Image (cartoon, rainbow, N blue to C red):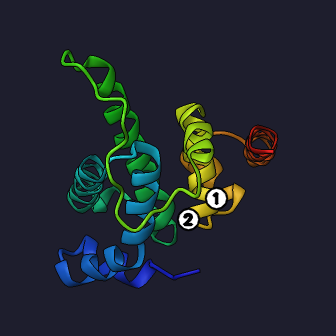
Amino acid sequence: MNDFSADVKLAKKGSTEAFSRLYAKVYRDLYHIALYNLRNTHDACDVVSDTVLDAFCSIEKLRQPEKFRNWIMAILSAKIKQKQRDYFNITKEIDDDFPEIDNFDYDSVELKEALGRLDSQSRLILSMSVLGGYTSEEISEVCEMKSSTVRSKLSRIKEKLRLELT
């Protein structure tokens, strides 16, 4: 795991280079988790951009520099939830086909449909665990639940997918 403390302290003092190094350590996770949850490259990019902007503007509020990764993921989680709420507020007709997703390949239509049936919290937990490699403790901080609950939910999500796909 990366130690973010030195760069966070420098970023709090206004170092854009330090913040850039922090971003370089987490940008792939941010994008993959956003893409997995939103299933739209443009929305994923927008959400990541908003997350980074908010993190940059509020870095001085981060009390525990070593928790930078969890902190920025919590911001991302809130942005994803807001974007998902925005989907329900759109008045125009939504196309049922998912857009082309760069560098992310669904193995089958069945997998795509099964993942689409998961609720947003389940998709977030699954994507953070599988795509981001986060521990249940880290996910629990982002999702504001006990780590044992995260492990239970993750186990149920995986079992549900296994049963649907066999």
Q: Position of residue 56 (x, y in %)?
A: 23, 62
Amino acid type at mark 2? Gly
Q: Position of residue 12 (x, y in %)?
A: 27, 71
x 56%, y 45%: residue: 109
**Which percent across, then down, holds residue 48?**
29, 56
Q: Which residue is mark 1?
A: 129
Q: Which mark is residue 53?
A: none
Where does residue 4 sit, x and y in percent of width and height?
45, 78
At a point 53% along the width and 56% down the height, the residue shown is 106
- Decide: marks 1, 2 in contact (CB < 8 A)? yes
Q: Is residue 23 above or below residue 93?
A: below
Q: CA distance from mark 1 to mark 2?
A: 6 Å
Quarter-of-image position of residue 27 = bottom left
Q: Residues within 10 Å of mark 1 (few under 14, many from 20)?
A: some
Whether residue 44 sits left or right of residue 78 in the image: it is left
Number of numbered callouts drawn: 2
In the picture provided, is 111 more to the left or to the right than 18? right
**Residue 144 visible to an observer of this rendering:** no
Q: Quadrant of the N terminus?
A: bottom right
**Relative to the observer, which residue lies in front, 23 or 159?**
159
The residue that appears at 40% across and 35% down in the rendered structure is 81
Amino acid at circle 1: Ser
Residue 72 sits in quarter: bottom left
**Disc 2 target residue:** 132
Q: Nearer the viewer, residue 23 or 141?
A: 23
Q: Residue at x 32, y 73 (%)?
A: 23
Task: Tell me: residue 160, above or below residue 41.
Answer: above
Q: Secondary structure at mark 2?
A: loop
42 sits left or right of 150 in the view = left
